[in-house]
Structures are given as structure tokens and as C-alpha cells.
Image (spheres, rainbow, N blue to C red):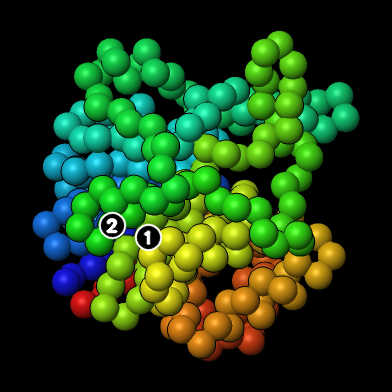
Amino acid sequence: MQLKITTLIEDTLGEHKGLLYEHGLSFFIEKDDYRMLFDVGQSAAFLSNARQLNIDLGHLDCVVLSHGHYDHSGGFRSLTEETNHFTLFTGQGFFDEKYGVSNNTCEFLGNNFDEAFLSSKGIDHQFVHERLKEIFPGVYILSGFPRIHDDETINTRFKIFKDGAFQQDLFEDEVAIAVDTPRGLVVLLGCSHPGMKNMLDAAVELLKKPLYAVLGGTHLMEAQGNSIDLSMDYLKKESIKIIGASHCTGKEALDRLARDNNCYQINGTGSALFIS
């Protein structure tokens, strides 16, 4: 088993100063003979970075989009100009109109494409209906996360416009990827709107394996009360050896991980993780 995960784009820049960075996230996953994208950032910048990193995105097996926010799906139109020979997986509700609403201000935060666009490009699209869907040997999409941890709440500013009215966005469309390795589960998170701990607990429950590595957005930037404390304690689980939290994790949580958790590693644009 060979696994390599490259962060094609993220909010920060690493040592390779020739790369672009933006508020967004995109992972390129290579497992054995399979090649996958998890999220595509907010623009075409991830494509430029792939070229700089000698990564060919013209022969993808699948693309998984974690949820319908622009900073995770905005680069998809640009990707389809280079290839359409892949299967796209999204959660149910991915195409709901997503907004940020605060006082009298309303801002569209959703996707720049719809199902008609996918049809026009001849792209095979599948909604994920199952809590656990194996897409390749040892590679799973997780969805439908039980909301167990009371401290993990969703900011009420996140709304969907549906049936003529704004409703609270519960992010039922959000999905994650889990890769089963001999060392344990490697879990990739987009933004963790349903709650990082809720999502990681679901991976362990469904796959009956311990966590080994956690990569991606944890949305601790909006944690309230003692939620950051509880999350920091959670990430000290004995089985977790790699913590590549990034994107929407927030400065306070990242500073605490860097100071207090020896398993934390900087996961900026251009970073790569190898597991065999």
C-alpha cells in the first residue's frame, strides 16, 4: 500500500514560493493506482500549483467535493476545462443555495456551477446517500454525521435559501474521506461544519479502526466556550500520530497545536504526506 497526499492549495504558503495560495483547500490523493482530488479551492490557482509540482490532473479517477461552499468548489469549472473523465461525488444538498447572513447583510457563499453544467460537460455525478461508501479499495466517503458533541455548534449566520425562505444550514451535504492504512485511518476534512469530533468519531465507528492521521479544516476558528479545549484534548488520542490541521482551523487552535501537540505538522500549500 502506497499513499501520498499533496496539499495543492491552502490558506498559507510553505517553502515553495512559486506556488499560489488562497482561502480554500484542495488535496491530491494518490493511493496505489488511484488518483483523486478532494476539494478544488476557490479558483484555478490549484491547477497552477499542480503544474508547478509536476502533478498531472488530466487522468483523475474521481473528484470529491466536501460541501457546497465556494472556497472548496470554486475551482471546479476550471478543472473541467482540462478534463471531464472522472466521477464527481458530492453529499446530498450540495447544490442548495448557501449564504452568509448577518444583520441586514446577505452574501452568497455557494457553488458557481449546477447540475445542468455537469450534464453539459458530460461529467458523471453521484450523490452520496450512504454513511459509508467505498469508492476504491480502502478509500471511503463518509456522510450523515451524528451530532454527538454538544460543544460543536454551527454558526447561525450560515443559511440556505430554500422554498422561498432562509433556513439554518445544517451542512448535511458535508462529506469527508477516510483511507484505511496499515497504521490506522487517515481522515481528510474539508471544513468540519458538522463538528470535527463528530466526524472523526463517525470514521472510527463505521470502519472499526483507530485514527492515525487527520488532515484539513477543523473550523475551530469559530469555536465557542471550551470547545477548543475539548478539541485539543481529543487530538491527543494515543493513536493519532499526524495532525495536519489547516484552512479554517484558526490561529488560536493552530498556535496551541504547535505548542502543545508533538504530532502537529504544518500543512500549508505544497505540503505532502507519504504513508506506506
Q: Position of residue 222 (x, y in %)?
A: 74, 55
Q: Earlier in the sequence, mark 1 or mark 2?
A: 2
Crowding around mark 2 (Cα neighbors within 10 Å: few <14, some 14 to 19, many 20+) is: some
Amino acid at pointer 1: Ala
Q: Nearer the viewer, residue 18 or 121?
A: 121
> How many angstroms separate mark 1 from mark 2 (CA)?
6 Å
Please give the name of the residue rendered at 52% of the width and 46% of the height, measured from the top-left corner.
Answer: 144
Q: Position of residue 50 (x, y in %)?
A: 27, 50
Can you say whether 119 is above or below 71 in the image?
above
Q: Which mark is residue 178?
A: 1
Please give the name of the residue rendered at 71% of the width and 58% of the height, measured from the top-left corner.
Answer: 152
Disc 1 vs disc 2: Cβ atoms closer than 8 Å? yes
Please indicate whether residue 158 sits to the left or right of residue 198 in the image.
right
Please give the name of the residue rendered at 23% of the width and 68% of the height, measured from the top-left corner.
Answer: 3
User: How many marks can you see?
Assistant: 2
Where residue 199 sits, quadrant-wise, is bottom right
Q: Position of residue 86 (x, y in %)?
A: 21, 35
Please indicate whether residue 217 sits to the left or right of residue 121 in the image.
right
In the image, farthest residue toward the left: 33
